[in-house]
Image: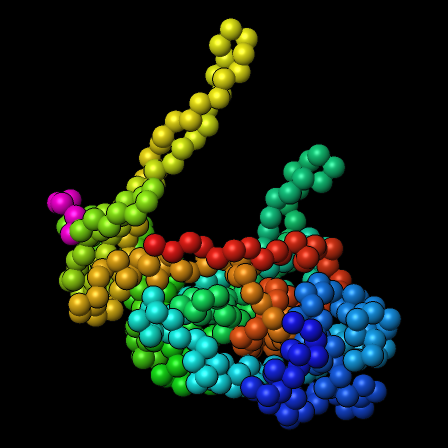
Amino acid sequence: MSRHRLETYLDKVFGFSALVDALPEGREFPQHPWKKVFDAVFLGATMQIPSLLQIEAECRDGALAKRIGPISDDTLGYALDRQSPKPVFALSCEIARRLKRNGVLRSNWSRGLLVAAVDGIEICSSFVRCCDACMEREMQHKVNGEMKTDIQYYHRIVVVVLVSTSFPIPLGVRFQKNGEGEVSCALALLQDLVGQLGRRFLDVLVGDALYLQAPFVQEVERLGLVWAFTLKENQPDLLREAERCTKESPTGIHAEPGREIRYWHLPEVDWPVADRLVRVVKTVRLEHQHRVTVSNEDGHRIKSKTEVTQESTNFYATNFELGSISPLFIPKRHRKTLVRFPRLDVYQELHFALGVSVIRTESWTSPLMNRPPICVNCERSASVNFSSFQPVNAASTL
């Protein structure tokens, strides 16, 4: 799709230009209007340009020369540093609402439910450069062949992504504050999203075992969300009870070409820490694979294929009322989850423009992004290769 067709589509479906025009200006005496800065960053993101310097080059004598015109990377950074993320947050939420209203977010496998995944990831680190909002930790590393302990500066983000759609759509990102945990950061992001999108926008929240904590689960339920989290050793009592109750024959077996899935369904399992009952699903996946082995016979290398079976066991805890739905629906939602944010295979919007939120430690959303967000200050100063974040295909489903 050409740039002109993209902008025409955005204006026709979302009224995008009008939404951008309504964004307030964060500078007192700007030489370049905020819309010009926004358009340069937005179009640069859709072109997957990895740095402000390259956007400057494209605006000067490249693909954006006629559309944007000359603008320096210092101007982009200065404008982004002073732009409040709240109006852009509201803009992205408005786009997300229209996507849902237009039926773009519907999917058959999730039975009409909007399923979102939450996860955290470290996006950059440096022993040399930092910004005021960088997190700090002591790390050992080699300097001239000797181990040395230094302070490392880094940024972590928590992201909420729609995984029930045909491709993952990031809904919101929040930078962790120094001294703030991932779970509390995730809760603040979810509260911001529910406040902007409404309690009925999302239906189900999935995540890894870190989020299976009684206080977090209670807050998620207060937000009106159904949850399903991986069950591991961080909840030993619940895990032991689930293991004890699944020693018998499985509830069912689901066979597919090259794999077999055995599952156990426990409608009510006692969770002592939370003083409540939860639903637990256990799956044992048997993957039948062929591996090539090389052997030497009389000085000749001979290749042969050997069939091996790879087994993996997973437990999931949830408050989802299955009714007539198969218990395999729970692990299927997790298989649709992309475990790490850089692995999302589609991004298309405002990775720079909203990177300013790290300075104010506020959350922002972006339903179309083309790479993980970064801190503008750190990108311009740190010796970190941010272009190493490459999109890959989504995880396979059951």
Q: Is residue 292 above or below residue 179?
A: above
Along the horizontal axis of the image, is 92 left or right of 335?
right
Q: In x, y percent, where is residue 30?
A: 80, 88
Q: Residue furthest top?
A: 298
Picture mark count: 0
Residue 355 visible in the current orientation: no
Q: Quadrant of residue 359?
A: bottom right
The structure residue drawn at horizontal position 64% and vertical position 43%, both measured from the top left corner, is 141
Q: Quadrant of residue 55?
A: bottom right
Q: Is residue 106 above or below residue 280?
A: below
Task: Pick whichever, 291 or 387, lies toward us.
Answer: 291
Q: Quadrant of the N terminus?
A: bottom right
Residue 37 visible in the current orientation: yes
Q: Quadrant of the C terminus?
A: bottom left
Q: Assess whether residue 208 is covered by the magenta stretch.
A: no
Q: Is residue 196 above or below residue 314?
A: below
Task: Pick whichever, 255 or 132, lies toward us.
Answer: 255
Along the horizontal axis of the image, is 386 left or right of 191?
right
The structure residue drawn at horizontal position 74% and vertical position 81%, both measured from the top left corner, is 37
Along the horizontal axis of the image, is 247 left or right of 383?
left
Q: How is the image coloured?
A: rainbow
Q: In x, y percent, where is residue 279?
A: 21, 62
Q: In x, y percent, where is residue 371?
A: 61, 64
Region of the chain picked out in magenta, as a range: 247-251
The structure residue drawn at horizontal position 55% and vertical position 81%, both measured from the top left corner, is 92
* Main SS of residues in magenta: loop
Q: In x, y percent, where is residue 56?
A: 81, 71
Q: Residue furthest left?
A: 248
The structure residue drawn at horizontal position 39% and vertical position 27%, both measured from the top left corner, is 306
